Amino acid sequence: MFQIKTLNKISPSGLNRFDPERYTYGDAIEQPDAVLVRSAAMHDAVLPDSLLAIARAGAGVNNIPVDACSQKGIVVFNTPGANANAVKELVLAGLLVSSRRVIPAIDWAKTLKGNGDEVGKLVEKGKSAFTGPEILGKSLGVIGLGAIGIEVANAAKSLGMTVFGYDPYLSVDAAWHLSRSIRHATSLKDLFANCDYITIHVPLTDGTKHMINAEAIEQMKDGVRILNFARGGLVEDAAVIDALGSGKVAAYVTDFPSDALIGVDGAICIPHLGASTPESEENCASMAAGELIDFLENGNIVNSVNFPTVSCPRSGQMRICIIHQNVPNMISRISAVISNGTVNIENMLNKAKGDFAYTIVDINTAVPAKLEQALMAIDGIIRIRVIA
């Protein structure tokens, strides 16, 4: 019986995927085989020896101690693309409200309450204070062409915008979904110089933190409008506040309010609503549960942020799953130990990701305890799991 610990309220669309004859789940489980989490902070959490995997029902994993998990051989999954449509729709709303000054106009209209028949005249007299440009024919720069960035780029193109995309790590699979009419920006400088609107869709890392800073803003068009529905730390608050004050930036729409930004003229702070739709929560929960099930039952890894994608059909009676360091001669040492144990290898698959690697070995016999011990004795082996 697999034990799944839930750290947040998880949609039934995900929980219902767990076969009650094989799985138990809940928030009180103390020795879980896996954790299913949305936004709960795990950096101070104890990672028990029983823990094999953590699945984040969402794209970002900043709430999970990924490095510590890697060292312990705990696979961390996310759900890329499951909330892409929800975020895309809010980005489109952000494009519109950054241009048409809809939010301050609504706030102003509320002040007209109590003027009776004069409201109509007051509206016509005061509406000119809230004019703003149309997005048709304007240029949008999309930084990061993952699942969300591609959907935003394609949707903006269909709305009549000229779209520039920048992503030096664009995958072949992602490229297949990108409209051929999206223009390729060869650098951020190229994108900054050409775009009236800029939207960011990259993960927050040491390399991307404050990528939108004073120096970057200086390279942008005067009156640029910036949208951030990815992570708050990607944009330096102080720099964008200064640029709003000078008029260099006409509007900044963010899904990540901060105390410094709230109340600043031109800053539109949305309370992290990007993936807050019932459809998105259902998609993320279902996808995360499916990743855990396939890993726990078959050892397959798909959509992990710290280990490579390794997935193949079962071809033997038993499957040995080995998490290890990505070092030379590891595969030869693993195969030599298994062969010396008079076990025939039916299938073997290995892939690496950074400093770590994952190997699946299918065999047609039971795995002797001494074989597991011999494998664990290999320098660089982090974790071994045998699946019947």
Image (cartoon, rainbow, N blue to C red):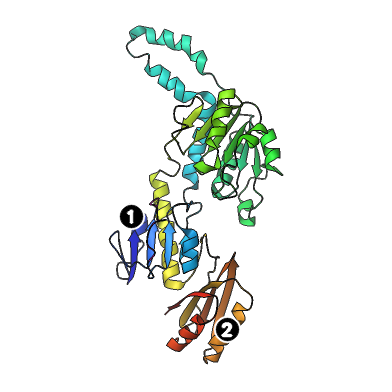
Tell me if label 2 and label 1 are in contact, CB under 8 Å.
no
Residue 21, given in percent of the width and then of the height, sits at 30, 70
> Residue 189 lies in magenta, yes or no?
no
> Mark 2: which secondary structure?
helix
First in sequence: mark 2 vs mark 1: 1
Separation of marks 2 and 1 at Cα, in angstroms: 42 Å
Residue 143, given in percent of the width and then of the height, sits at 61, 43
Image position of 251 with respect to 379: above or below? above
Was residue 45 drawn as part of the magenta stretch in this picture? yes
Q: Quadrant of residue 259?
A: top left
Instruction: Give the quadrant of residue 195.
Output: top right
Label 1: which secondary element: helix
Which amino acid type corresponds to the residue marked 2 in the rendered image? Ser
The numbered dot on residue 12 is 1
Q: Which residues are magenta?
A: 38-48
In depth, the one of 383 and 158 nearer the eye is 383
Q: Which quarter of the image is occupied by the C terminus?
A: bottom left
> Is residue 162 at all visible to an observer of this figure?
no
Question: Callout 2: few (<14), some (14-19), or many (20+) C-alpha neighbours within 10 Å?
Answer: some
Closer-to-camera residue (52/312): 52
Image spot of residue 234 (x, y percent): 55, 42
Report the quarter where the N terminus lies. Answer: bottom left
Q: Which of labels 2 and 1 is toward the front?
A: 2
What residue sits right under mark 2 in the picture? 335
Classed neighbour count for the residue bearing mark 1: other residues with Cα under 10 Å, few (<14), some (14–19), many (≥20): few
Please give the name of the residue rendered at 44% of the width and 57% of the height, measured from the top-left corner: 287
Q: Position of residue 155 (x, y in %)?
A: 57, 39
From the image, give the main secondary structure of the stretch colored magenta.
loop
Q: In percent of the image, x 51 and y 18: which residue is there?
A: 130
Query: At x 61% / y 41%, what residue is drawn?
Result: 142
